[in-house]
Image (tube, coloured by chain):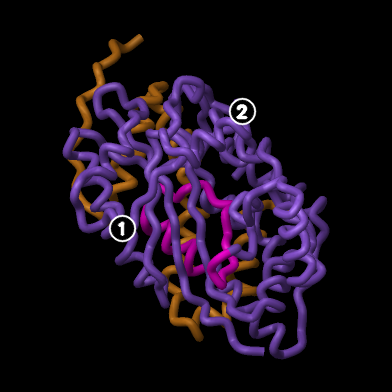
């Protein structure tokens, strides 16, 4: 088996903030219409008050840091043109999800149609970390085993204790909001890459989903890139935190590869037990 | 088992050897600071407990998001709430 490249890619979703009201503002389409060197690495999201960035492919956490600093700076500069600010947290402390504008592109209007109020309520912000794994068998093995560590990772990144002006009593309310979506949460055990592919193919062939990007699990083999994508994290507020999480996840996959190569294993846990730990991570951090 | 203990075990015992091979011990060990000082959620809750003002929480998020990135101009100052 070929050793995984362990490349790193990080996506972050940020809040666009009005510095007077401290509320979210719908501004992403205007930001995308500006001229700035970081624009090729910026995407809109479902709501107009969300802006998403993605790093280029990195080899080390140090490179991730450079990219994230550059991207956050670029987004802050773009927002500053209108006097707005950028904040990174899994939820906004008091924004009203019911009145948020949906980004007026077909893709997002379609999601609003498909998902109804669940889409309107998806006013949440996450960090996604991609780790490069080229071998499909190891990709699925790593996905199965790494499921166990999702609650650990969530604890370290929890950044959404407030929702709609209320203290929720949870550390990661974002996880609870996301859970309402279909195909979300801790994924089921996958028997093989073939098993995963045939699950996707069945959903696509029956017209249930247009493609694998509609699988919203906390961890998933990515549909296009040769990566394992961790999606469980609330967006990290500090760059230091995001870099640390990327380093931890890269080390985790390196370790799992080493064990696999040496013919030792880490136990594969049932989803029910992992969900139990995840609930505690959501509640208490 | 309490979560911080479980996470320490994960970092020390499970990842301890590999982080030196990768040369990423410093980045990985930042997680100990999170365990000691609290996650972003803990920090937000602490600010709210102190100020009872969610706008102060937003201000803190803006500043922490820019840490190591750039100095952000301060937001409009929050009105001073009379004591009592």
Residue A179: x and y in percent read 67, 40
Residue B13: x and y in percent read 64, 74
Q: Give SS at disc 1.
A: helix
Q: Point out the image quarter for the N terminus of chain A.
A: bottom right
Marker disc for residue A40: 1
- Chain A colour is purple
- The quadrant in which residue A59 appears is bottom left
Q: How many marks?
A: 2
Horizontal arrangement in the rendering, residue A197 relative to residue A57 (left or right): right
The region drawn magenta spans: A224-248
Q: Residues within 10 Å of mark 1 (few under 14, many from 20)?
A: few
Residue B44 visible within the image: yes
Badge 1: chain ID? A
Marker disc for residue A116: 2
Q: Nearer the viewer, residue A119 or B8?
A: A119
Badge 2: chain ID? A
Q: Is residue A19 above or below residue A151?
A: above
What chain is the orange one? B
Q: CA distance from mark 2 to mark 1?
A: 30 Å
């Amino acid at each position: 088996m070929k050793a995984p490249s362990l490349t790193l890619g990080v996506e972050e979703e940020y809040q666009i903030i009005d510095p007077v009201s401290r509320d979210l503002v719908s501004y992403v389409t205007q930001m995308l219409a500006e001229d700035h060197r970081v624009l090729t690495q910026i995407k809109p999201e479902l709501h107009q008050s969300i802006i998403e960035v993605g790093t280029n492919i990195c080899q080390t956490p140090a490179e991730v840091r450079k990219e994230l600093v550059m991207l956050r700076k670029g987004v802050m500069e773009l927002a500053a043109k209108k006097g707005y600010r950028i904040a990174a947290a899994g939820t906004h402390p008091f924004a009203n999800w019911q009145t948020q504008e949906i980004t007026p592109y077909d893709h997002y209007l379609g999601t609003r149609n498909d998902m109804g109020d669940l889409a309107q309520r998806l006013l949440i912000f996450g960090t996604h970390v991609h780790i490069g794994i080229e071998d499909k068998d190891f990709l699925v093995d790593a996905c199965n085993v790494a499921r166990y560590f999702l609650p650990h990772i969530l604890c370290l990144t929890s950044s959404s204790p407030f929702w709609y002006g209320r203290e929720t009593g949870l550390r990661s309310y974002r996880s609870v909001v996301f859970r309402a979506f279909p195909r979300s949460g801790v994924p089921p055990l996958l028997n093989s890459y073939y098993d995963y592919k045939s699950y996707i193919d069945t959903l696509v062939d029956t017209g249930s989903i247009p493609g694998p990007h509609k699988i919203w699990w906390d961890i998933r083999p990515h549909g296009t890139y040769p990566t394992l994508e961790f999606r469980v994290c609330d967006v990290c507020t500090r760059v230091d935190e995001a870099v640390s999480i990327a380093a931890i996840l890269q080390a985790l996959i390196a370790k799992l590869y080493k064990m696999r190569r040496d013919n030792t294993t880490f136990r594969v846990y049932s989803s029910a037990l992992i969900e139990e730990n995840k609930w505690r991570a959501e509640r208490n951090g | 088992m309490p979560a911080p203990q479980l996470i320490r075990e994960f970092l020390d015992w499970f990842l301890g050897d590999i982080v030196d091979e990768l040369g990423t011990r410093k980045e990985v060990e930042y997680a100990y600071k999170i365990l000691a000082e609290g996650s972003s959620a803990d920090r937000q809750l602490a600010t709210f407990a102190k100020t009872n003002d969610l706008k102060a929480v937003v201000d803190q998020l803006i500043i922490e998001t820019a840490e190591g990135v750039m100095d952000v101009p301060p937001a409009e100052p929050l009105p001073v709430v009379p004591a009592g």
